[in-house]
Structures are given as C-alpha cells and as structure tokens.
Amino acid sequence: MTKTLTLAAVLISLGTLAGGQSSISIVEDSLPRFNTGMDVHVRLHATGIAPPFTWSVIEGDVPDGITLSPDGLLSGRPTKPGGFAVTLKVDDSGHPPHSATKDFHASVDTGLLLDWLDAPKVRDNRIDGSVQVSNGSHDTYDLTVVIVAVASLDQRATAIGYQRFPLKPGTNNFRISFGQTLPAGGYVIHADAIAEIPERNSILRQRLQTAKALEIAVGP
C-alpha cells in the first residue's frame, strides 16, 4: 500500500536525515522589563517545522505573580521588584519531540511606590501629614493622589489632600502634603495614588490607611 506523506512529515524526515534532528529554536533573545502592579501579556515564539510548541520552565522561576502557560504566554501582574533568572524550554510535536532551551535574565522594576512621609497627626482641630511617591519605571505616569478622612461615626469621607500631575520616570520620594480642619470625632485616613499610563492602557494603584482612627477632641 502506498502511503501519502504530508509536507510536514516530509520536512521532518529530511531534517532528521540531514542533521540528525529537526530544527527548533526560541526566537526571543531577551525578556522585557516588568513593573510591579502592571499587567504582563508577553507571547513567546519558537521556530520549527513541527508545531504546535509546548513551553515550560526547567530552571529558576518567573517573577511572583507571573505564570507561563504551555502555549508560551507569560501573563499576570508582578508583585515584587528585583532581578530574576529563568531557563525556558520549548518542545515541538515531533515523534519523538525535539526541544530547545534558553537562559533569560531580566528584572521587575518598582512601578509605583506610595509611603507615609509624615504620618497623619492631630494638631488641635486639624489632621496634617504628607506622603511620598516614587516612579521606578521607564514610563511617565499621569498621577492622581487623593487623601481622605473617613469619619468613624457615619463613614462620611472628607478630602484633605489632592494633587494630579505627570510623575516622570526615575522620580524618587516626591513629597505631597495634606491637611484640613475637621469637626470633632474619629477619622481613619486613606491615601490613594492612581497612575495612568495611556500608551500602555494601564493603571497602577497604591493605597495607605492608618491603623486606627485619629481622634479630634475639639471641633473648629
């Protein structure tokens, strides 16, 4: 009986005869820089004559918050900054399968940091303080920072600080002060930073909150 060979089978046979195995390789020479809190959607690519390909991690780890799917998609949201090293492997669908590996070294940058600089304090009938923001990425942020005092009694929120401005890449510990006279009562202070990156269609968020309510004994 005469067998009909597919083009892929013929190419696999020729590759095996010529070089002992079919050719497969990983296209990417490097991985992009990641940012904490920013969504990752990176498709890896391989070349070979027996797709589909199956991807796996054989040494090291991808960053916390990121996963590698068998079809070669790196996705998720990094949670920690720092460098990482990982060895990736790709297998084709040959019988037996052929594989290729490649070592990658990359980093996760600190995308957006928000910290108390001067923790909120009661001064007479006011609550005052300051926060600091940092941009460790390579993007300019359209940054909005809002500080509100949430009343313990009725949960009413009063804005005691607000700023919106472009936060340039590499900016460290930019100070934003806040303060407001408030009626007598207890207040939990929330500080929210929202960084929009239009060219990436991404938004980063950070929040701070006082551990307990601050008490103002005398009203304005």
Image (cartoon, grey):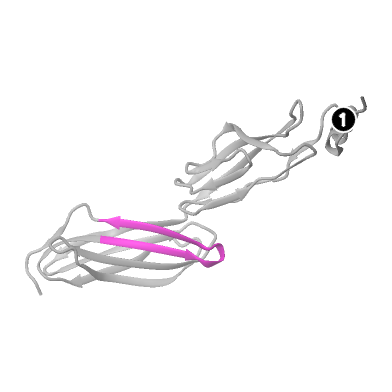
Q: Residue furthest front?
A: 1
Please report the residue visible at 26 percent of the width from the left and 66 percent of the height from the top.
Answer: 148
On screen, residue 9 above or below 81: above
Residue 193 in the magenta stretch? The answer is yes
Residue 128 in the magenta stretch? The answer is no
**Looking at the figure, which quarter contains the N terminus?**
top right
Looking at the image, residue 45 sits to the left or right of residue 126; the answer is: right
Q: Nearer the viewer, residue 25 or 166?
A: 25
Residue 46: percent from left, percent from top: 72, 42
Looking at the image, can residue 192 be seen? yes
Please report the residue visible at 44 percent of the width from the left and 46 percent of the height from the top.
Answer: 79
Q: Which residues are magenta?
A: 190-209
Residue 208: percent from left, percent from top: 30, 56
Please report the residue visible at 8 percent of the width from the left and 71 percent of the height from the top.
Answer: 219
Looking at the image, can residue 173 be seen? no
On screen, residue 98 above or below 126: above
Looking at the image, residue 7 sits to the left or right of residue 67; the answer is: right
Q: Which residue is mark 1?
A: 13
Looking at the image, residue 39 sits to the left or right of residue 143; the answer is: right
Picture quadrant where residue 49 is located: top right
Looking at the image, residue 158 sits to the left or right of residue 143; the answer is: left
Residue 64: percent from left, percent from top: 48, 41
On screen, residue 3 above or below 215: above
Magenta stretch secondary structure, dominant: strand
Q: Residue furthest bottom?
A: 220
**Looking at the figure, which quarter contains the C terminus?**
bottom left
Element type at marker 1? Answer: helix
